[in-house]
Structures are given as structure tokens and as C-alpha cells.
Image (spheres, rainbow, N blue to C red):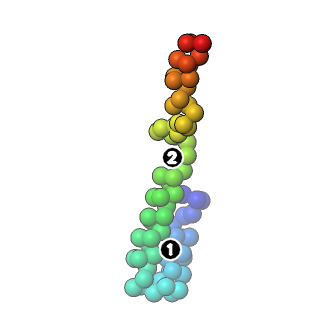
């Protein structure tokens, strides 16, 4: 995980406790977890093809135009 070991994570936790205090640290952790989850889902969604392709008005009229051309 990002090349961080246990000592580095403990140091980050201690700095977080000093800067934000023990009351706000759980809220910050929760917000960070949600952000990481949203980032991962957005990152995986960009690799998937779109579920439906937008069809323009002209594309919908193609069969009707083809029938008109056949009559000519």
C-alpha cells in the first residue's frame, strides 16, 4: 500500500491526532474512506463501455428515410 510500513502509518496517525484532535479524527477517516471508495468506483467505471449509446433524432429517422427512398 503506497510503500508505507507500520512505522510510517503510526507516525501519520500521531501527527493526525496532534493536528486534528481525537474528536475529529474518526470523521476525517470516514470522509477519507468514502473518497477512496468513490475514486475506485469512478476509476473502474471509466474502463467499462457505456450502458447505452445516445441516439440522435436523425438516427431514429433512418428507417423512415430508407422506406421513402425505396418508394422513389
Q: On the rendered image, what quadrant is the C terminus found in?
A: top right
Whether residue 49 appears in this view of the structure is no
- The residue at the point 54 percent across, 76 percent down is 11
Left/right placement of residue 58 relative to residue 21 reads right
- The residue at the point 49 percent across, 76 percent down is 13
Residue 38 coordinates in the image, percent (x, y): 47, 58
Graded by Cα atoms within 10 Å as few (under 14), some (14 to 19) or many (20 or more), the crowding at tag 2 reads: few
Closer-to-camera residue (48/4): 48
| Residue furthest front as drawn | 72
Vertical arrangement, residue 28 with respect to residue 21, above or below: above
Closer-to-camera residue (46/4): 46
Residue 67 coordinates in the image, percent (x, y): 52, 17
| Residue to which mark 2 is pinned | 45
Q: CA distance from mark 1 to mark 2?
A: 33 Å
Quarter of image, res 8: bottom right
Closer-to-camera residue (43/18): 43
Check disc 2 and report its element: helix, strand or loop: helix
Check disc 1 and report its element: helix, strand or loop: helix
Mark on residue 10? Answer: 1
- The residue at the point 56 percent across, 23 percent down is 65
- The residue at the point 39 percent across, 85 percent down is 23
Amino acid at each position: 500500500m503506497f510503500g508505507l510500513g507500520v512505522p510510517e502509518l503510526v507516525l501519520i496517525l500521531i501527527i493526525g491526532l496532534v493536528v486534528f484532535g481525537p474528536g475529529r479524527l474518526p470523521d476525517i477517516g470516514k470522509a477519507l474512506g468514502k473518497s477512496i471508495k468513490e475514486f475506485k468506483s469512478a476509476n473502474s467505471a471509466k474502463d467499462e463501455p457505456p450502458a447505452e449509446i445516445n441516439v440522435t433524432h436523425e438516427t431514429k429517422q433512418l428507417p423512415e428515410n430508407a422506406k421513402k427512398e425505396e418508394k422513389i
